[in-house]
Amino acid sequence: MAISFSHTSAIVEGIIAALKQHLPSDWLTTMAPATETPCKIIDHGDLSHMVYDIDSFSSLMPAIYVKGVSVTQGTAGLDGMVDTVERIRVVHARRRDQTHTASAITLEDNISEAKERYAKELLAALFTDPYRRAGTINRTTSVRTDITLTGATGETAKVWNHVFVSLDYGGGTPETQAIQQARWLDSWAIAIDSDVHCWTG
């Protein structure tokens, strides 16, 4: 019998849920006193697929979008199980006038330092789960929830590991290259790749 072992959509939605619980609150909503420009979008997909002109593109920032990059065969597994590795990319794009210094509404002039600070916050949110399975820990109740995976034909599936792959500060992935080259946007982007390991069977 065929096994359905692609779980990209469920994993991406799980990563988005984790980010919404684990990112600092001022990334998600306006706080008083204001210390950050909150994200206008945290969504599944590619920002370039959602807009068609410069004004629309710029108006969606700050943005975080999450997408699947690839699915490859893993090296571990049990009898009757398929081991796969889902490469997931998280991209954060922000305009210069939305880029702040640490713990202040003051704008940051040094974009390199800003990228490093925002990347640190994103990495912390992505890897909050102490079990390293991309689980979500509720901000209010502290209850942990695993990503739910289901096969198309009823297979059992689970995430068994979530590992960091790379951090692109700009120019190393198509997404950051596009924003880096669009100088008229006065914006920047960073990208984080991670691998989610799954068993299906």
Image (spheres, helix red, strand yellow):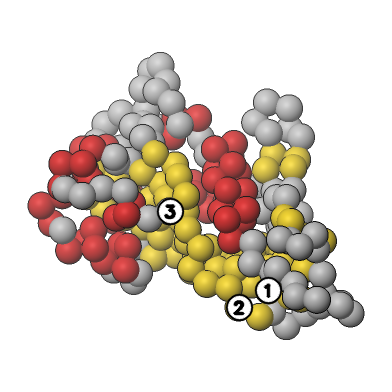
What residue does disc 3 label? 45
Identity, as a three-letter code, of the amino acid under mark 3: Gly
User: Image quarter for residue 16?
Assistant: top right
Q: Residue at x 62, y 48 (%)?
A: 14
Q: In this rendered view, identify the residue nearer to me: 99 or 196.
A: 196
Q: CA distance from mark 3 to mark 2?
A: 20 Å
Identity, as a three-letter code, of the amino acid under mark 1: Thr
Q: CA distance from mark 2 to mark 1?
A: 6 Å
Residue 85 against residue 60 in the figure, above or below: below
Instruction: Tell me whether circle 2 and circle 1 mark residues in contact (CB < 8 Å).
Output: yes
* Image quadrant occupied by the N terminus: bottom right
Q: Tell me if mark 1 has few (under 14), some (14-19) or many (20+) residues whose alpha carbon lies within 10 angstroms of its own.
A: many
What residue does disc 1 label? 84
Indicate which disc, 3 or 2, sits on the residue closer to the N terminus: 3
Is residue 67 visible in this depiction of the protein?
yes
Q: Secondary structure at mark 2?
A: strand
Q: Tell me if mark 2 has few (under 14), some (14-19) or many (20+) residues whose alpha carbon lies within 10 angstroms of its own.
A: few
Q: Tell me if mark 3 has few (under 14), some (14-19) or many (20+) residues whose alpha carbon lies within 10 angstroms of its own.
A: some
Q: CA distance from mark 1 to mark 3?
A: 21 Å
What residue does disc 2 label? 72
Left or right, 180 with respect to 71, comes to left
Q: Residue at x 39, y 65 (%)?
A: 168
